[in-house]
Image: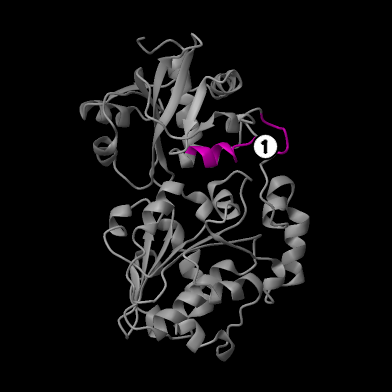
Amino acid sequence: MTAILEFPPEARAYQPHGAARDLFYSHDREVLIEGPAGTGKTRAICEKCHIIAQDVPGVRILWVRATRASMTESVLATFAQKVLPPNDPLAFGPTRQNRHSYKYPNGSEIIIGGLDKPERIMSTEYDIICVFEATETRLNDWEMLLTRGRNWVLPWQQQIADCNPSHQRHWLIMRARAGVMRHLQSRHTDNPALTPDYLSDLDNNLSGHRRARLFEGLWVAAEGLVYPNAEKCFVPHTQPPVGTLVGGMDFGWSNPFAALGGTFYKADDDLWHLYVWYERYKTQCTIGEHAKALPTGHVWYADPSAAESIIELNRAGHKTRKAINDILIGVNAVNSRMEAGTLHISDQCTALRAELGAYHYPDNKESEKPVDEFNHACDALRYLVMGVDRGRVAI
């Protein structure tokens, strides 16, 4: 049979409990293991992969997050500090920051990657693919990774998503509830190593949606959402209508570069609608790389603080203009379109949809501006809407 059945975890020092144990014995094609902070989800995945890599020669496993940089002090730290025995040969070699893989003596390999550099991970095949903090990723990324799960050294191929809960309409929980993925709910009782002090910190120091997600394990929307009517705009992807090609762009390197492309058109109701159907959401790519990947023919409204990047895009043949960057006016403009039903967002724009479900105002009410985090696609949307609504698009 398989390594998991031939070498049961009871014979090893690590003892999985609850959802972690179910994960160990699961051969399901797609699995979501989710729950509050500290339940041992990441370690359970690392332990399962390590056992299989040790016991099955030639198996190939991929560990991936939205960015490669985010792996270093999260997944790789857990693997080095909690899974590998002291002085294990696998721990020697490159530092965690520079490591590309763990190579086992029997020819098995765990490959480390990031979805910000897909060319490094999409050119080969794997038996098991593990997507950590999967709420940071897009449905399109997940489906593309599924095409790489066909190495067949194992008699079953598996793709695992690990995460804390997010908002209740996130594509991950919707996919699990639809029965496409095996849904494992991890709880604090699954991790006997948790201390009462840790649980007390979570209980006492978290509030609102963060407490609900990270302590109670609930999929809930953030309080004080900036765009409470965003879901009304979500539509299945369709062929874009005839109209003016427009786009919004927020620059980033360690933070994601976000570009949204859409069509501005006059509908049957005699109103001007905006259909957003293209998304690029990448980290650690040069402007030159973005310029080659972006579709042509759009008028792009970009973060005005990045003047040199705008010039470089224009030199590459893109029509890029400085966006209007008044946050409060821009948020009002986007909300107005959402309420009026004249903004439509394709299900291809998964990063934007995820951000819209989390973008919120500060809990302390000390600022009228939203919290400046996880908002890169939201900023691109704001630039885009301000571009078309301020009459800067030739109709």
69 horizontally vs 42: left or right: left
Residue 339 lies, with reference to residue 97, above or below; the image says above
Residue 39 lies, with reference to residue 260, above or below; the image says below
Residue 29 can be seen, yes or no: yes
Query: Is label 1 in a helix, a strand or a loop?
Result: loop
> Can you give x and y, in whole percent of width and height, for residue 345 in the image?
48, 31
Q: How crowded is the residue under tag 1: few (<14 C-alpha within 10 Å), some, or many (20+)?
A: some
What residue do we see at 62% from left, 45% from top?
167
Q: Which residue is mark 1?
A: 362
| Helix, strand or loop: magenta stretch | loop
* Nearest the eye: 236 or 19: 236
Task: Report which quarter residue 311 is drawn in.
Answer: top left
> Can you give x and y, in whole percent of width and height, for residue 332 in the image?
59, 20
43 horizontally vs 158: left or right: right
Task: Report which quarter residue 324 is drawn in.
Answer: top left
What residue do we see at 66% from left, 42% from top?
221
- Is residue 183 rendered magenta in the image? no
- Is residue 353 rendered magenta in the image? yes
In which quadrant is the C terminus drawn?
A: top left
Residue 90 lies, with reference to residue 41, above or below; the image says below
Task: Report which quarter residue 256 is drawn in.
Answer: top left
What residue do we see at 56% from left, 36% from top?
356
What residue do we see at 65% from left, 76% from top?
17
The residue range painted magenta reads 352-367
50 horizontally vs 395: left or right: right
Q: Amino acid at mark 1?
A: Pro
* Nearest the eye: 330 or 170: 170
Residue 114 can be seen, yes or no: no
> Can you give x and y, in whole percent of width and height, for residue 4 in the image?
49, 82
In which quadrant is the N terminus drawn?
A: bottom left
